[in-house]
Image: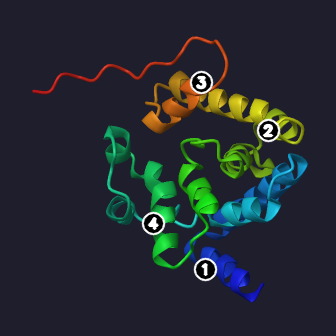
Amino acid sequence: MAEWTGWEERVRLMVRPRRYEHVLRVAELAAQIALANGLDDMRAYAAGILHDIARDLPDAELLRLAPPECEIDAGHPLALHGRAARVLLERWGYHDQVVLEAVEDHTTGPRGGNRVAACVYIADVSEPGRGVNADIRELALRDLNAALERAIVSKVTYLQGRGIPVHPRTLQAYHSLPFAAPRVQPPPRPPRL
């Protein structure tokens, strides 16, 4: 337990106080969602605590830790904070791959059926401090898959409604959903001059 307290303290020191309050709410909610769905609540809590460890780093540091994979990453380095967090954690000796993947994917959506990552993604978009998505939070305590689908659709709809490009990883998560809604397509690339 002393080792885990060290991780929580490291996160507390790396983020602003309001961000740390968010981190604690995400961790608690992710653990609740995991427990309600028969999953490992300790892993969900760990991923919730660690998910935003790189959130308050400067853009240059995010770009150094997680080189851009696409134009969205390059133009909006904050999109990299999940991948950057994973890199930091690995460098510091954190090895739980389920938790690391959940941390990496919390910004774009879980890949490969990682249900702990689903708990963290849902908790991040619906924790009570955000003041939105209470329906997703409540649904997650009964039906993780339905809540994940609703969370991903909500994110894509929100971004598109504001004319914000959707990250390719989020589109991949969206396209993997088992529903027959029209598929969202990435915007056409402008011609290179």
Point out residue 96 in the picture as x, y percentages from the top left corner. Answer: 61, 67
The mark that comes first in sequence, 3 or 2, is 2
**101 above or below 110?**
below
The mark that comes first in sequence, 4 or 1, is 1
**92 above or below 123?**
below
The mark that comes first in sequence, 3 or 1, is 1
Q: Amino acid at mark 2?
A: Leu
- Residue at 39 percent of width and 52 percent of height: 77
Label 3 Cα neighbours within 10 Å, binned few <14 / some 14-19 / many ≥20: some
Judged from the image, the secondary structure of the residue bearing numbered disc 2 is helix
Residue holding disc 3: 157
80 or 46, which is in the foreground? 46
- Residue at 76 percent of width and 34 percent of height: 145
State the separation of the CA atoms marked 3 and 1: 35 Å
Where does the N terminus fall, quadrant-wise?
A: bottom right
Residue holding disc 1: 10
Camera-side mark, 4 or 1: 4
In the image: residue 58, left or right of residue 13: left
- Residue at 50 percent of width and 63 percent of height: 86
State the separation of the CA atoms marked 4 and 1: 15 Å
Judged from the image, the secondary structure of the residue bearing numbered disc 1 is helix
Query: Which numbered marker is on residue 87?
Result: 4
Point out residue 108 in the picture as x, y percentages from the top left corner. Answer: 54, 42
Count of picture labels: 4
**158 above or below 119?**
above
